[in-house]
Image: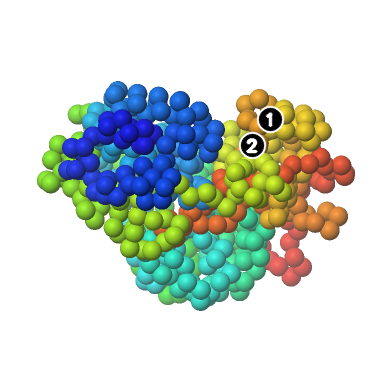
Amino acid sequence: MIHAIAAAGLEDGDFLATRATGWDRFRRYVMGECDGTPKSPEWAAPLCDVPAEAIRALALEAARTPTMLTSTWSLQRAEHGEQPWWALIALAAVLGNIGKPGQGVAFGYGSINGMGTPRRDLPSINLPATRNPVGLSIPVARVTELLESPGEVLRYNGRDITLPDIRMVFWAGGNPFHHHQDLNRLARAFCRPDTIVVSEPWWTSLARHADIVLPATTTLERNDIASSSRDRFVRAMHRAIPPQGLARNDHDAFADIADALGYRAAFTEQRDESAWLRSLYDRWRRACATLGVEVPDFDRFWEEGHVELPPPEETFTSFADFARDPEANPLATPSGKVEVFSETVASYGADDCPGHPVWLPPSEWLGGEAASRHPLHLLTTQPETRLHGQLDPGRVAAESKIAGREPIRMNPADAAARGLADRSVVRVHNDRGACLAGLVVTEAVRPGVVAMSTGAWWDPRVVDGQEICVHGNPNVLTPDRGTSALGQGCSAQSCLVQVSAWTGPLPEVSVHRPPAIAEGASARP
C-alpha cells in the first residue's frame, strides 16, 4: 500500500518531513532501490493472496479519504510479529493522518473492552509495587530458555541478558501450561529447578508440576475490589461463599511465609483483608481528589457495590497535541517523532529486526519448504466457551467439544483430500508434538488453514509409544520461538501442522480429575 501511495505521489510530505524520521531510507526499500525488489502490490499479491488491483485501490482510497488504521493484537504473535505493526504505523505516517480525529492508527480495538473507551486519566486501585532487588527480568515468552539454558545470553531489545541458574520457581497467577508454546519442551525445562511452588485454586497442569501447592481462594471466596485504569467502574467484590477445603487468601499464605522469615509485621503492615481494602480504597480516593474527582467514602462504596467515574469532559484524540506542535509535544521516542526508520533499533544489529519495517518470511508458513511436510497453517484463537483455560471443566466448555476433544476447524476441500468426516476425531501433529481434536468441517476457514482454540487443559499420554495430548491443547504444536531479538514475544501463529484420521481407541480425558497424591505427601493448612 505504501508503494502504491508513493508511486502516485500521494504521500504526506509535510508530515514525513516534520513529524517523522527516516522516510527517505524507508522509501528506498519500499521502491526497491536498495535491493532491486519494489514492494509493489504485484509483489505483495502472491504473498497475501489479495489481488494487486485490490491492494492498489485500497491504498489510493486511503490516501484520498480520512482513514483510521487498526490491527488486532494477534498479528504480533507470530515470527517477526513486530513488522506488521511497525509497517502500519509507517503507513499512517505516509498518510499523514496521525493526530487527526477519527484517523491515525491504534491497536487492540475489539481485543478487550478497555481499548478506545473514553475515560479520565485516573489511577486504579492496587497494592503498591515493590522493587525487585535482583534487578533482572526477561520477556515472559522466554521462560523455557530461562529454565533450560542457565549461563546463555538472551538478546532482547538491544541488551544481552545472561540467564541465571533458576533453582526455585514460585508461580502465582497464570498458567504457562495453558498459554506457553511447545509444552513438551516446557515440561522438560520444568524438571530442572529443585523446587516449584504454585499458588492455585485448581488442579491445572501447572499445579500438577509443583512440589508444593498453596491452595488459593477464588474471587467468590474472598472480599476484593475490581478496578482497572481503563474502566470507569470500580466494583466491590463481596465474598459469596467461605473458603472451600484448605483454600486461603494469597495474602494470608504469604503473611505466614513472611512470619517464618521474621518480617510478618513489615509485610502485612498490621492489616487484615478488610483493613487492606479500606486502606487501598482510601489511598485511591485521595489520589482522585487531587485530580478533581470526588468519590464516595469506603463504607458507602462497599454498601452500594460500585463507583461510576465521570466520563471525560472533552473528546480525546490520540497524538493531537503532537500533530499540532511536535516540538512542544514530542513523542516518547529517541527522536521525539514517528520513527519510520529507527537509528536505535538499527544500532542493535539484529538481522530479524532491522531499522525499518521489512518483509521477512517466517520459518513456518505456507510459502516455505516446511509446508511440504506439514501443509496446513494452524491458527490458535481465544475460545468462545471459556476465558483462556478458566472454566474448561465447566458445562459450557464441555458441550462445545467433540467426543470430549477440542474442536479443530477445517475447510471442506482439505477434509475431503484427507478422507476426514465432520465430527470425527483426528490427530493433529508436527515435529514438536501431537494432539487429538474433534473435526468441524466449515467454509469459514480458508483452504490450507486450520483453527483451534486454546484452553483445553493439557492431558499428555503415551499412546503407542508416542506422547500425545488426548484432550486437544494446540500448544503442544506451536513453536517456542521469539518474534525477534527486539521483542522476544511469542510466535504461536507461525505454525504448520498435518492432520490425519485417528483410528485407534479413544483415550479417556482425565485431566479434570484431581491427581493421586503421592505416598508420604501431606495436605495441611
The spot of residue 418 in percent (x, y) is 79, 36
Q: Which mark is residue 449?
A: 2
Crowding at dot 2, Cα within 10 Å, few <14 / some 14-19 / many 20+, comes out as some
Label 1 residue SS: loop
Q: Are marks 2 and 1 in contact (CB under 8 Å)?
A: yes
Quadrant into which the C terminus falls: bottom right
Mark nearer the N terminus (2 vs 1): 1
Residue 22 visible, this orientation: yes
Q: Residue at x 40, y 24 (%)?
A: 57
* Residue 473 seen by the camera: no
Residue 144 on image: x %, y %: 56, 63
Closest to the observer, 340 or 113 = 340
Q: Position of residue 137 (x, y in %)?
A: 42, 65
Q: Nearer the viewer, residue 66 or 282?
A: 66
Colour setup of the view:
rainbow
The residue under the point 62% across, 61% down is 186
**Residue for point 69% across, 36% down:** 408
Q: Is residue 4 above or below residue 201?
A: above
Give the number of the disc on residue 137. none
Q: As shown in the figure, which amino acid type bears the numbered disc 2?
A: Val
The Cα–Cα distance between marks 2 and 1, rounded to whole angstroms, is 7 Å
How many circles with numbers are drawn on the protein?
A: 2
Q: Find residue 464 and report its horizontal and vertical position in percent.
A: 86, 55
Q: Secondary structure at mark 2?
A: strand
Indicate the quadrant where residue 367 lies.
top right
Instruction: Please state if 412 lies on the left or on the right of 143 as rendered.
Output: right
| Residue type for callout 1 | Asn
* Left or right for 86, reference 143: left
Q: Which mark is residue 411?
A: 1
Residue 133 versus residue 447: which sits nearer the camera?
A: 447
Which of the 4 image quarters holds residue 375? top right
